[in-house]
Amino acid sequence: MARHKVEISGVNTANIKVLTNEEMTNLFKKMQAGDLHAREELVNGNLKLVLSILKRFHTRCENMDDLFQVGCVGLLKAIDNFDLSHEVRFSTYAVPMILGEVRRFLRDDNSIRVSRSLKDIAYKTLKIKEEAIQTNTKEPTIEDIAKKLDVSIYEVVTAMDSLKNPVSMFEPIYNDGGDTIYLYDQIADEKNESNNLDIKLSLQDAIGDLKKREQTILDERFVIGKTQMEIAEELNISQAQVSRLEKSAIDKIKKLLK
């Protein structure tokens, strides 16, 4: 049966050789003895490892050739620094290094430039969440994270938002077989909205007529960005109750704005 040919950065993936553990060990010994050809064979024999890692990022990068080359940089670093005496599989050692290079590229290649301090808060937040889940099996609240990092809740929310990929104004959002509706079709032109201020004032009045708990839930859900589960734990009620209160509050606002 013919193998499917896919080319990336000029490499035919159908012809990539996969090395056995014994072949890898022998090549590493030759390379460490000064054989440059052995190093090249190690690179070519591990390209499928790079490709397997890139599969999880195919929706986050338009140019997979660039991402493949970045992954190969991580592979080269892994090959040059691998120590046979540690008695671990090369793939176990190489995967984190390849992933690190790819994630660093995607982070720095973001079309929206984010300050280094904001990025630091975002990655520290992710680390705190990961550690908390491993030890307590649940995520910490945004307040807990902000307190631990000694920053405001707003800074934590903004930092996490900075990690999200931007969406093009020409992103199609609906197609029923006829004309496609794009994101920019749904963006209002504030210059032509003479009643914009009236809407804001009416919304403010409508929210003011809600019960305190309903106001709290809407504020924490749509301003702070908490999940329903986080709010439920804070208010000592079930997630289903939070969901009902949230829906009820939104329905009330809709009626008051009609």
Image: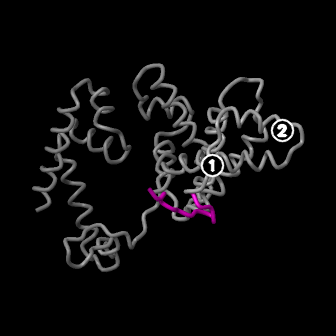
Q: Give the left or right position of residue 192, taking residue 251 as reference.
A: right
Disc 2 residue type (three-letter): Lys
Looking at the figure, which quarter contains the C terminus?
bottom left
The extreme top residue here reads 135
Residue bearing the label numbered 1: 17
Residue 30 is marked as: 2
The extreme front residue here reads 1
Q: Give the left or right position of residue 86, taking residue 31 as reference.
A: left
Looking at the figure, which quarter contains the N terminus?
bottom left
- Image coloring type: one colour
Q: Give the left or right position of residue 214, taking residue 64 as reference.
A: left
Residue shown at the point (75%, 34%) measured from the top left: 82
Residue shown at the point (27%, 77%) measured from the top left: 194
Say whether disc 1 or disc 2 marks the residue closer to the N-terminus: 1
Q: How many marks?
A: 2
Tell me: residue 129, above or below residue 34.
Answer: above
How far is the residue under mark 1 from the one under mark 2?
18 Å
Residue 213 % position (x, y): 22, 35
Residue 22 % position (x, y): 69, 32
Q: Is residue 234 magenta?
A: no
Tell me if mark 2 has few (under 14), some (14-19) or many (20+) residues whose alpha carbon lies within 10 angstroms of its own.
some
Residue closer to the observer: 219 or 202: 219
Residue shown at the point (45%, 26%) measured from the top left: 133
* Stretch of the chain drawn in magenta: 1-13
Residue shown at the point (33%, 41%) measured from the top left: 220
Disc 1 residue type (three-letter): Lys
Dot 2 lies on which element? helix
